[in-house]
Image (spheres, rainbow, N blue to C red):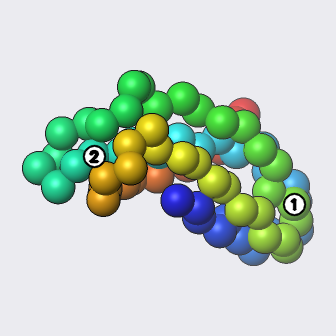
Amino acid sequence: MFAVIRNHTDADYTLEARTHFVDRDGVPTDADAVWKRFTASANGLTAYREYSTSDQPLQYRVEVREVR
């Protein structure tokens, strides 16, 4: 799974993201999600990528937050 993050501002931002993987019944399939830190450059694109330990079809939710 990957998500493209676009920064539409003129400033760099330090962000964190994490991904929760669940099966079709909503049951978590992996250990607790861990926040991963990255920088979103001014007016730029950043790709956030995460892998599940399962090889089954999954749903996922990505959370993104700014680090202050």
Asked if residue 54 shows in the view, the reply is yes
Q: Residue furthest top?
A: 31
Q: In the image, which is nearer the foreground, mark 1 or mark 2?
A: 2
Q: Quadrant of residue 35?
A: top right
| Residue 55 drawn at (x, y percent) | 38, 50
Q: Quadrant of residue 27?
A: top left
Is residue 57 found left or right of 46 in the rendered image?
A: left
Identify residue for label 1.
41
Q: Nearer the viewer, residue 14 or 25?
A: 25
Could you tell me which residue is drawn at 67 percent across and 65 percent down? 5
Could you tell me which residue is drawn at 27 percent across and 46 percent down? 22
Q: Nearer the viewer, residue 15 or 23?
A: 23
Is residue 6 found left or right of 27 in the rendered image?
A: right
Residue 14: which disc?
A: none
Kind of residue at badge 1: Ser
Kind of residue at badge 2: Val
Ranked by sequence position, the earlier of labels 1 and 2 is: 2
